[in-house]
Amino acid sequence: MTKTIAILAGDGIGPEIMAEAVKVLNFLKTSHGLDIALEEGLVGGIAYDVKGHPLPPETLELAKRADAVMLGAVGGVKWEPLDISLRPEKGLLGLRSALNLFANLRPASIYPELADASPLKPEIVSGLDILIVRELTGDIYFGQPRGIRTLENGERQGFNTMVYSESEIERIAHVGFQSAQKRQKKLCSVDKANVLECTEFWREVVIRVGKQYPDVELSHLYVDNAAMQLVRYPKQFDVIVTTNIFGDILSDLASQLTGSIGMLPSASLDANNKGMYEPIHGSAPDIAGKGIANPLATILSVAMMLRFSLNRADLADKIETAVKKVLSDGLRTRDILGSATTTQYKLVNTQEMGAAV
Ligand code: ATP
Ligand code: MG
């Protein structure tokens, strides 16, 4: 049955990098019989300009109906004066919560060809291959009550609430353990159980879920120590599972160990492995329209989509080996210290992407 893929390019470099991802998808369609239909939709600042809202109803309808969503990037200085409820980023957050994408998977692996792009010494990062599983729809970002209030004595106060229900922790823990089963079978759960009851509970539930995965080695770290360990001995990690706020911070940290913001993909999944796939970087307004953005993070997000939502790991492998090939050919855009242009990688011309036999 034909799978529908929503293509939401967004703002800034979004359309430029998405065009390259679409080339790969169309190639897989014609040369490997991948049965897909691509449907474009507006999201972010462009959607506000055209439709008056960063997540117009027709885009939401498309995203809900589609089997998977490919997203470019949203945002830009042009829309900064807008009320927060109309900013481009609201389009992204709206999609995450409307689609119930509670599991955010962010691999951070280093390509040997790019070892010099990492800010850390080669011996610390060579061979690095981490997967961060971040809970995406709970925690202090969504907990009630929240706000800014004035106390009886007249002093003002800001407050948020960290909250996780048992089922929310269980479902993300399962994603963590199952991801580890497919990799090195090591899962580190990151919390602050010594200080925050909410994450003391998190640890308790993760341990209980872990009894169903005796083949996975489970460990625990407090978030402050995890941050330190990620910089000092990052290779000790296989899969990290953590809360929304800790995952937000640690996944940015982990991505920078690889030194290549333009290379890293991500997946945000619901309970049925329907997902939204996007590069971890933003809309890069400083280079938008110049044709020098790195499209590989978006193309690698296509690979994640093939693996998780379309059950085509074989085609995902092809993309990933083709990326290694173009890097070993010396092609590099500015973000990875080169001067190649967006369209120069030409993945579909590589032997690695070759037609199926
Ligand atoms: P956001 O808030 O949306 O994450 P940001 O301003 O934090 O956006 P990015 O848009 O990710 O950050 O850009 C950070 C820097 O990295 C910029 O200098 C940008 O040009 C560069 N950059 C980001 N993505 C790419 C890419 N795909 N190719 C080349 N450079 C990139
Ligand atoms: Mg950012």
Image: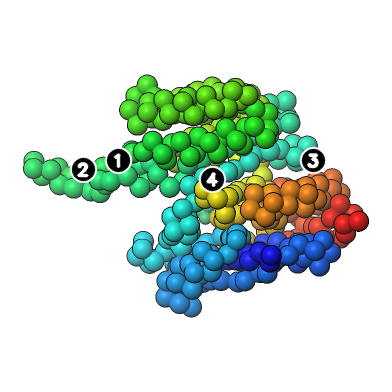
Residue type beneath disc 2? Gln
Give the crowd class for mark 3: few <14, some 14-19, many >=20 residues within 10 Å: some
Side (left or right) of 205 relative to 296: left
Q: Secondary structure at mark 4?
A: strand
Quadrant position of the C terminus in the picture: bottom right
Which sits earlier in the primary sequence, circle 4 or circle 3?
Answer: 4
Q: How many angstroms separate mark 2 from mark 4 (CA)?
A: 31 Å
Mark 2 close to ligand 1, CB under 8 Å: no
Give the crowd class for mark 2: few <14, some 14-19, many >=20 residues within 10 Å: few
Q: How many angstroms separate mark 4 from mark 1 (CA)?
A: 21 Å
Which sits earlier in the primary sequence, circle 2 or circle 4?
Answer: 4
Residue located 55% across and 23% down the image = 218
Proximity of marks 3 and 1: CB atoms separated by less than 8 Å: no
Which sits earlier in the primary sequence, circle 3 or circle 2?
Answer: 3
- Check disc 2 and report the residue beneath it: 157
Q: Secondary structure at mark 1?
A: loop
Quadrant assignment, res 198: top left
Residue type beneath disc 4? Asn
- Check disc 3 and report the residue beneath it: 113
Q: Which mark is residue 161?
A: 1
- Check disc 4 and report the residue beneath it: 104
Which sits earlier in the primary sequence, circle 3 or circle 1?
Answer: 3
